[in-house]
Amino acid sequence: MIAFAVPRTGETVHETEIFALCASRLAGYKCPAELHVVGQLPMTAAHKLDRIALRRAGTAEEQSSIGTR
């Protein structure tokens, strides 16, 4: 599972803190394996989260990492 995080203005996101928070509050199978920090989340024309674009971004990341092995 991949998680996407958008930091608040002027703040930084530490992956270890997010993973620790997830591990303390979620079941193991619900914890993300990867974290991508982005500037903003993609939205549809109806101002809803564009989950298809997020899936494509996650797949593109996987494909690029597979090609560099």
Image (tube, rainbow, N blue to C red):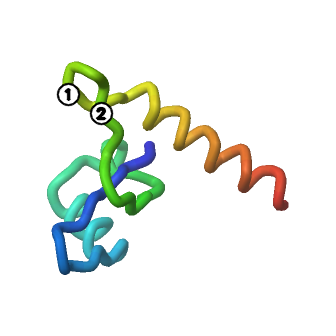
Contact (Cβ within 8 Å) of mark 1 with mark 2? yes
Of residues 46 and 11, the one nearer the viewer is 46
Identify the residue shown where x is 47% and y is 56%: 34
Of residues 33 and 52, the one nearer the viewer is 52
Mark 1, residue position: 47
In the displayed structure image, the side of residue 10 where residue 18 appears, left or right: right
> Distance between the Cα atoms at labels 1 and 2?
5 Å
What is the crowding at mark 1: few (fewer than 14 residues within 10 Å), some, or many (at least 20)? few
Q: Is residue 16 above or below residue 43?
A: below
Q: Is residue 51 above or below residue 32?
A: above
> Which quadrant of the figure contains the C terminus?
bottom right
Q: Is residue 52 above or below residue 68?
A: above
Count of picture labels: 2
Provide residue 26's location: percent of width, then percent of height: 21, 50
Identify the residue shown where x is 73% and y is 51%: 64
Provide residue 61's location: percent of width, then percent of height: 62, 49
> Which quadrant of the figure contains the N terminus?
top left
The amino acid sitting under disc 1 is His
Of residues 20 and 28, the one nearer the viewer is 20
Mark 2, residue position: 43
Identify the residue shown where x is 27% and y is 59%: 6
Of residues 22 and 7, the one nearer the viewer is 7
Identify the residue shown where x is 20% and y is 79%: 11
Residue at disc 2, secondary structure: loop
- Residue 36 is labelled as none
